[in-house]
Image: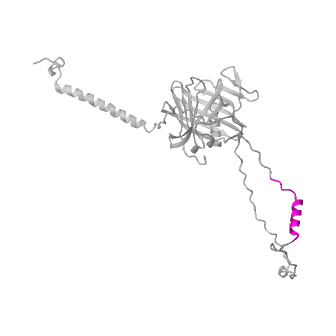
């Protein structure tokens, strides 16, 4: 028998050929079972996974207009015309003791011949002179006063509501997050709750009032997990921002925002005048964090389709441009007209590439949203 170095007769292994063939079948069966379990797991988790939206790309350098800070112009109040009721003619009082015969109408007086009246076609030699004298003696007509033209930004603050969002970390769905927003026309409050795995609940709160420049924060706080909250105080009397995280204070700029009130400030501006925010339009905001403030340049990218839990909807994409050289932290905001220009998607990309996303989890068409 010729010798093959990688060939071993069956009798040399100590097992019969049937036992060795049965062992291979067991391996094949185990592989098939593992594959079936993996497919079942994928089918189980597929319904709870949200459709992923495309990662925003770098916008092309297009500059249409740089919007500057202006006083806001509140929406014009709607004045309803008063209801006019027809005036009824007075009815003669009827005495119970008055006989019915006294209610007969009084006969009209006899018509007397009158002098002929000049018609429009009858020439009157003194008509032109009388008309000229009357026009000269009549006072000159005065035009009604015109309202003063106010130049500023049209502004419409979103109404009160509790907004629910799906939170995703690197595209994987996490627990639901919420944005509580209240507005009574003079004051506002905003509380953002975002749960993160292995860290805990992140709570960001902002409260203040609404002034001639829009949303005006008075206090902003951040609480991450079990850590104590870091607070920033907007002292508008001294024009300073004071932080509890650091002993330093910084000047308070006109129209200053915090990192979450700026979202509602942007939404209020877009609600007031959507046509102004065309692709390439850029606007700068002074934004304070928990220990510093800086300028955020936010640019309009354009209208895009966003896929959320309720389906597809059109939204206007805004992105924060780099704040300084080497700035790798990104922020993208999508405002949906079907939601009254509220944010339908918020995406923050960290310098290490981690993405934290809020995606609208309610109905995509609110009654009376537009």
> Looking at this view, is 220 or 125 the one in front?
125
Would you say residue 175 sits in the magenta stretch?
no
Q: Is residue 322 left or right of residue 254?
A: left
Q: In the picture shown, does residue 362 fall above or below 356?
A: below
Number of callouts in the render?
0
> Which residue, as the protein is rendered here, is positioned at the far left?
1
Q: Is residue 212 left or right of residue 195?
A: right
> Looking at this view, is 228 or 351 the one in front?
351
Q: In which image quadrant can residue 13 be found? A: top left
Image quarter of the N terminus: top left
Q: In the picture shown, does residue 365 fall above or below 253?
A: below
Q: In which image quadrant can residue 9 be found? A: top left
Color style of the picture: one colour
Q: In the picture shown, does residue 49 fall above or below 112?
A: above
Would you say residue 131 sits in the magenta stretch?
yes
Residue drawn at point x = 16 percent, y = 22 percent: 10
Horizontal and vertical percent position of residue 141: 83, 56
Q: Is residue 367 left or right of residue 113?
A: left
> Looking at this view, is 305 or 162 the one in front?
305
Horizontal and vertical percent position of residue 76: 71, 47
Horizontal and vertical percent position of residue 108: 85, 80
Magenta stretch bounds: 125-143
Q: In which image quadrant can residue 199 be found? A: top right
Horizontal and vertical percent position of residue 35: 33, 32
Q: In the picture shown, does residue 227 fall above or below 79?
A: above
């Amino acid at each position: 028998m010729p010798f093959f170095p990688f060939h071993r007769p069956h009798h040399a292994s100590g097992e019969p050929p049937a036992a060795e063939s049965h062992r291979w079948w067991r391996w094949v069966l185990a592989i098939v079972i593992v594959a079936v379990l993996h497919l079942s797991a994928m089918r189980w988790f597929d319904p709870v996974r949200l459709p992923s939206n495309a990662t925003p790309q770098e916008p092309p350098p297009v500059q249409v207009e740089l919007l500057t800070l202006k006083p806001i112009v509140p929406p014009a109040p709607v004045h309803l015309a008063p209801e006019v009721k027809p005036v009824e003619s007075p009815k003669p009082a009827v005495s119970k003791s008055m006989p019915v015969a006294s209610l007969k109408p009084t006969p009209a007086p006899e018509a007397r011949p009158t002098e002929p009246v000049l018609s429009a076609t009858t020439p009157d030699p003194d008509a032109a002179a009388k008309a000229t004298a009357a026009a000269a003696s009549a006072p000159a007509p005065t035009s009604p006063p015109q309202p003063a033209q106010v130049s500023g930004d049209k502004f419409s603050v979103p109404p009160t509501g509790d907004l629910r969002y799906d939170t995703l970390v690197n595209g994987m769905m996490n627990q639901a997050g919420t944005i509580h927003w209240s507005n009574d026309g003079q004051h506002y409050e905003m509380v953002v709750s975002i749960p993160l795995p292995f860290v805990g609940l992140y709570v960001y709160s902002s409260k203040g009032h609404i002034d001639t420049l829009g949303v005006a924060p008075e206090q902003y706080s951040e609480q991450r997990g079990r850590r104590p909250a870091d607070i920033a105080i907007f002292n508008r009397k001294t024009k300073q921002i004071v932080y509890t995280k650091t002993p330093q204070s910084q000047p308070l700029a006109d129209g200053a925002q915090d990192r979450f009130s700026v979202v509602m400030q942007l939404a209020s501006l877009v609600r007031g005048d959507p046509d102004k925010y065309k692709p390439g339009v850029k606007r700068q905001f002074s934004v304070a964090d928990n220990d510093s403030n800086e300028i955020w340049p936010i640019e309009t990218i354009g209208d895009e389709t966003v896929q959320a839990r309720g389906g597809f909807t059109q939204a206007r994409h805004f992105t924060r441009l780099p704040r300084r050289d080497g700035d790798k932290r990104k922020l993208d905001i999508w405002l949906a007209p079907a939601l009254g220009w509220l944010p339908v998607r918020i995406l923050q990309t960290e310098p290490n590439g981690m993405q934290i996303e809020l995606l609208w989890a309610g109905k995509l068409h609110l009654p009376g949203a537009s």
